[in-house]
């Protein structure tokens, strides 16, 4: 069974990257615009204040025009898991529930043996 207790099919679409725009609104960004290898190589720069300020100004140009990924059930480490396949990037994110409000994610990139783990927390829009 998939992460939500059901199997996903290729017809389910999703927003891949959601970020806060200010304090009140979530916006979806298009990961296809982001130079993936460059972003991974210089990831520490993204934590700097100047990069965060620049990002806030670039959000408008990076907005997705609609869903940019597909959801389906795929095996990860031998266990059927919810997976998000990006349209314009060689990325698959796998998800497993930690508890009612948190999800563990594992990002894989085609051609890269590393696995990037992350945690997502449920956010209710104001």
Image (spheres, helix red, strand yellow):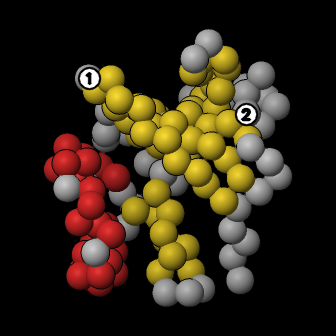
Nearer to us in this view, 71 or 75: 75
- Cα–Cα span, label 2 and label 1: 25 Å
Q: Residue at x 69, y 76 (%)?
A: 125
User: Which residue is denoted by mark 2 in the rendering?
Assistant: 3
The quadrant in which residue 105 appears is top right
Counting from the top left corner in percent of width and height, residue 101 is at 77, 57
Farthest top residue in view: 78
Counting from the top left corner in percent of width and height, residue 76 is at 57, 21
- The crowding category of the residue bearing disc 1, from other C-alpha atoms within 10 Å (few below 14, some 14 to 19, many at least 20), is few
Residue 79 is left or right of residue 26, and the answer is: right
Nearer to us in this view, 36 or 87: 36
**Residue 95 in the image: above or below residue 125:** above
Counting from the top left corner in percent of width and height, residue 92 is at 45, 33
Q: Residue at x 33, y 23 (%)?
A: 113
Numbered disc total: 2
User: Which residue is denoted by mark 1 in the rendering?
Assistant: 111
Residue 40: which numbered mark, if any? none
Query: In the rendered view of the protein, which quadrant contains the C terminus?
Result: bottom right
Mark earlier in primary sequence (2, 1): 2
Q: Is residue 84 visible?
A: no
The quadrant in which residue 83 appears is top right
């Amino acid at each position: 069974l998939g992460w939500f207790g059901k199997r996903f099919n290729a017809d389910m679409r999703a927003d891949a990257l959601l970020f806060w725009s200010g304090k009140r609104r979530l916006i979806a960004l298009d990961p296809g615009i982001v130079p993936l290898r460059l972003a991974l190589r210089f990831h520490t720069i993204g934590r700097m204040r100047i990069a965060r300020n620049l990002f806030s100004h670039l959000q408008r140009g990076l907005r997705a025009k609609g869903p940019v990924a597909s959801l389906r059930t795929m095996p990860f480490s031998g266990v059927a898991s919810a997976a998000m396949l990006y349209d314009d990037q060689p990325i698959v994110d796998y998800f497993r529930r930690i508890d009612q409000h948190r999800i563990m994610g594992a990002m894989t990139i085609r051609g890269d043996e590393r696995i990037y783990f992350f945690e997502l927390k449920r956010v209710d829009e104001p």
